[in-house]
Image: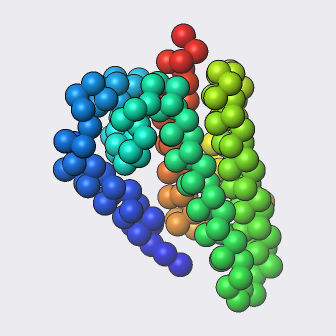
Amino acid sequence: MVSSFSCFLPLLVLVISCTQNRSLFANGDIDLIQKTCKTTKFYDLCMSSLQSDSTSSEADTKGLAIIMAKVAMANATSTNSYLSSNLLVKNTNDNLKKALKQCADKYSAAGMALQNSVQDLSLEFYDYAYMHVMAAADYANACHNGFKRYPRLVYPPEIAAREEGLKRICDVVMGIIDGLAN
């Protein structure tokens, strides 16, 4: 299994590369991104994610919310793939297989909820978009809770790190949506 550090390594590289390439954005564009990210719980995550997407320089606040929702969707999809690939590894523990399968299903549902949030944002149905993002974060939590059904299973740190990552990204999306709904 992959260490939890390696799960965050791509994010770290992204943050470093974005902070060194601030000149890619015009001042007006970076100002909107900064203003938007200041309304979220995780400013640095918001900034690095939005700066890594070239379309954010031309986006309004709704567009920034859509970009972040797509970042969350990519995270959920990646975690689903990670969990599914771990199911293929020869494992004799049936309870672990069941828990991983349930988690893969939860992350698949999270991806669908985030896809729905993108559609809702496009239609300016901000309440529905918020609810879908909140559901996506809760699906990640449900994965964690699923492991509790099997007393002898330990929740793998790699999955815990991915859960925390998705929850943080969803918090950023919800913070941006809060600004749109006002």
Q: Quadrant of residue 160 in the image?
A: bottom right
Point out residue 67 in the picture as x, y percentages from the top left corner: 51, 39
At x 22%, y 28%, the residue is 27
Q: Quadrant of residue 74 in the image?
A: bottom right
**For residue 137, side relative to residue 38 (left or right):** right
**For residue 154, side relative to residue 68 (left or right):** right
**For residue 96, side relative to residue 2 (left or right):** right
Point out residue 48 in the picture as x, y percentages from the top left corner: 34, 45
Colour approach in the figure: rainbow
Point out residue 181 in the picture as x, y percentages from the top left corner: 58, 15
Q: Relative to the observer, which residue lies in front, 142 or 26?
A: 26
Q: How many marks?
A: 0
Q: Is residue 100 above or below residue 60?
A: below
**For residue 94, side relative to residue 41 (left or right):** right
In this rendering, does residue 37 appear at all?
A: no
At x 54%, y 10%, the residue is 182
Q: Relative to the observer, which residue lies in front, 51 or 154?
A: 51
Q: In this view, does 136 lie above or below 37?
A: below
In this rendering, does residue 52 appear at all?
A: yes
At x 68%, y 24%, the residue is 123
Q: Is residue 110 above or below residue 34?
A: below
Point out residue 115 in the picture as x, y percentages from the top left corner: 68, 43
At x 45%, y 65%, the residue is 7
Q: Relative to the observer, which residue lies in front, 11 or 153?
A: 11
